[in-house]
Image (cartoon, grey):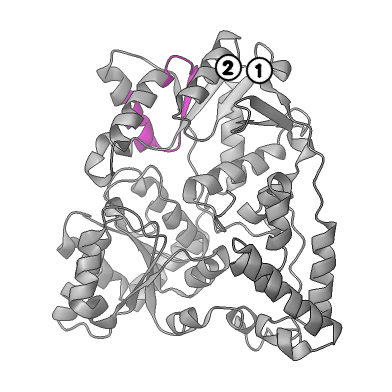
Amino acid sequence: MSKIDRYSGIQRVVVTMIVEMSRLVDADRLYLSWRDRKSGHYLCLPFSQIGAEAFASPESMRRIFRPSVARRDNLPPLKKYRTKPVKYYLQRAWLDVAARLGHDRRFHKYNMSAKMWRDARKGRKQVKQQTLSPVEFSSRARAGDHLVLLDSAWFSEQIDIFLQAHKAELVVHSMVYDLIPIVAPHTCDGMGPANFYQWLLRSQEYTDHYLAISQATLRDLKDFFSAHGVDTPATVVPLAQAALPSGADMGLQKQVIGPLSTNIATAAYPGLRELITLDDSLRHVVANPFVLCVGTIEARKNAWRIAMAWKALLDQGYVNLPKLVFAGRRGWLRQDFEDLLEATGNVYGYVRVIDGPSDEELDMLYSHCQFSIMASLYEGWGLPVGEALAYGKTAVVANNSSLPEVGEDLVEYCDATEVSSIAEAVKRLMDDDHRAALEAKITAANLRDWADVARDLHAAIGLFS
């Protein structure tokens, strides 16, 4: 968390569920627990000492747990120097002088004024070491308490802690997002599948109750333990079909509008205020029709076949095809995709890769895309499908694993293993009338939000009270 600027999918799920659970449970009774890397001790804090705003972003979490780094985060023009202290302090000193002299033009490139800079500098000084008082988990936990493991904990030191909790008669709930390393090991790298297999098998020693994020994951989980002659209690807590959470959702104050944005008539020019803060490299993307594929670029996400579907359509003469935008970090086992892009000039210039977009950039991309595509080979849920639906956009979605649970009857389905099937689904969504009909169904649909997830999680835990 000390270096990243955007949550991964599972990290976002974890922090959002924690915040939503805090709205259902007394904050003094809800504890956050973790293994301290320095001491090796398992510590905990009541949520009331932390607050929802701490989970808004990796940056806001650093303000609580890594305040020395957070002080640098607090200055937007210097974010890119956060891990380069010498450049950071030199650039900061130069801007301090410009601010004292009232040189507003120096700050216009950041949509700031000299006064906003001075206020930000004051804010930096106000970022103090918050007095946290974590205590040993064992000193707070009592028999009958619930320990809910929302993230995978594969390390032996953590497993030992959970075994002790189980021995102390705590009720241990383990959330399982997917069994992809076991059911689709060809999409994973290294010894990940073997390590995951051993962790999951051993988890039954301390887990009283499993939480699966989809019916598909539940089936895979039951099949796994059945193969080992084990019957385990498990409940499905489906994830959300929700847009990216805003700072307001996490309790943050509204961001200050820059001096070059204040007098924009937003009713006449909707989106202009957001567009002028968008990186130059993305402005051309959102100005033209495009289809959005969100997720880490790795073998399971099927980027090669998706790009090949675009090539197939172009080779058939569909020159009015929207561009294809991949938005995500570059992952593993993606060489075939990279080779395709290199050999075809990014599929004749129709494919664009945006490496590690920010949440603000993703929000803009979802808002402006024609539709999205998630033709993955396997998923535990499929957050980008639900996110697209929440923005009112339909999608091309693989008809496998959990994805139909997310897409319901609001998307076009395809066989992820067939390039021709992906291409045909894309062609169907190029029909404006058909796409509009699906969008109308999305508008009328009762999509699942994170409050629904928290209520179901709370109820599932309550089954073991």
Kind of residue sitting beneath label 2: Val
Residue 175: say if magenta: no
Residue 209: say if magenta: yes
Q: Residues within 10 Å of mark 1 (few under 14, many from 20)?
A: some
**Residue 95: image tag:** none
Decide if residue 250 is in sight here. no
Q: Report the residue marked by disc 2.
A: 171
- The C terminus, quarter of image: top right
Q: Residue 379, percent across and down?
A: 35, 45
Give the camera-side residue of 397 and 35: 35
Q: Is residue 269 above or below residue 75?
A: below
Identify the residue shown where x is 74% and y is 58%.
71
Cα distance, mark 2 to mark 1? 6 Å
Q: Residue 83, percent across and down?
A: 59, 60
Give the camera-side residue of 340 and 94: 94
In which image quadrant can residue 228 be found?
top left
Q: Which residues are magenta?
A: 203-222
Give the camera-side residue of 427 and 130: 130
Q: Report the residue marked by disc 1.
A: 145
